Image: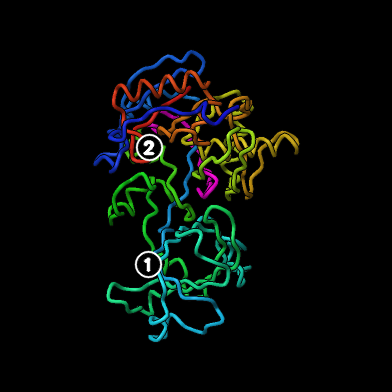
Amino acid sequence: MLVSDFNFDLPEDLIAQAPLADRAASRMLQVGRSTGQLSDQGFRDFPDLLRPDDLLVLNNTRVFPARLLGRRGGVKSQAVSAHNPAAHDFLQGRVEVLLTRQLGSATAADRNENDNDWECLVRPGRKIQVGERIFFGEREEGAVDKEDALQAEVIARGAFGERTIRFQPVGDFFDRIARVGHVPLPPYIARADSAADRERYQTVYARERGSVAAPTAGLHFTAEVLAQIAGRGIETAEITLHVGLGTFQPVRVERVEEHKLHREPFTITHEAASKINSALAASRRVIAVGTTTVRTLEYAAACAAQAGGVISAGSGEADIFIYPGYKFQVVEGLLTNFHLPQSTLLMLVCAFAGRENVLRAYDHAVAQRYRFYSYGDCMFLA
């Protein structure tokens, strides 16, 4: 199967550059999963399209300011310190770091020095070498505030700008990241991040910190819409998948089957596992909000198939790649945004509802001037 089979033409002016003031004011294209029938709706219609016995599953991950702007500081053997004013004479050039996955233990009780290790993407990707150090927290006038300073060393190198870096320990790492970091808006949003993005690029039910990109299908929900869903007696469950490189990495091969996804951490609680298993046992529809939710549920189902058929509570790392030909085990309905051409996310949607149906729906969305990508409109396939 060719990656080019998942291409489509999109006018640049349909790429949403900013969110709507009202989350729930988004448009929604309803797509018949088996028929391909299309219906133009508004997202506020979504609760009415659910059945009373549906289970709606949400990804409650929370985005953190994972985009860091710093300066190169040479190799470790040249002893300089981010707290030493003399270090600034040695700073060589600007570098951008996008943290994609934390390595090591996630619990404070088991934390060790390796928990400051992160997989990341760096720019310029070719120039940053193993052993180099990067300093963050520099103000415009060139000084470093000790309360904001962060220092990291590059300890491993991968392809396409991928690196592993080790941060020097600080008292509260994520508090410092919150002060120094920027919202990791996607590169197709041609503007700088703003203070408003810190909350707007989050779902209203975001709780578990760890994502470098929002699960964007959830951005349309408001407290009022969730209350309407609950008022109809529709059950909801929350899982967590921290969005990392696996979700948005580009496909650099010609054939779909040759692509490999990076792993992303997930958690399914006992409560969520119980709700999912009950729905499946009763042949009730499981509706996933977002492709990240789909991949978590289907990965858990694949693990369950090897362990007796019941989805288990717990944590792990998902690397499931879903493309046409895949047989879905859990999900029967999907709310999702419109995705990039030739992306793994578009391939997943095509696997769910058929490539011809989905690409026809995309052509319709372009003709009707739907807003595309992260801050854009959505589609409901069932």
Query: In the image, what residue occupies the spot 54% across and 52% down?
Result: 160
Frontmost residue, 65 versus 191: 191
- Indicate the secondary structure of the residue bearing disc 1: helix
Frontmost residue, 156 versus 275: 156
Question: Is 36 rendered above or below residue 295?
Answer: above
- Indicate the secondary structure of the residue bearing disc 2: loop
Q: CA distance from mark 2 to mark 1?
A: 27 Å
Dot 2 alpha-carbon crowd within 10 angstroms: few under 14, some 14 to 19, many 20 or more: many
Image coordinates for residue 134, horizontal then vertical, percent: 47, 71
On whether residue 237 falls in the magenta region, the answer is yes
Which amino acid type corresponds to the residue marked 1 in the rendered image?
Val
Image coordinates for residue 372, horizontal then vertical, percent: 35, 34
Q: Which residue is mark 1?
A: 180
Query: In the image, what residue occupies the spot 39% across and 16% down?
Result: 38
Frontmost residue, 49 versus 349: 349
Image coordinates for residue 109, horizontal then vertical, percent: 61, 69
Query: In the image, what residue occupies the spot 36% across and 30% down?
Result: 10
On whether residue 66 falls in the magenta region, the answer is no
Nearest to N terminus: mark 2 or mark 1: 1
Please state the extent of the stretch shown in magenta in the rendering: 229-247
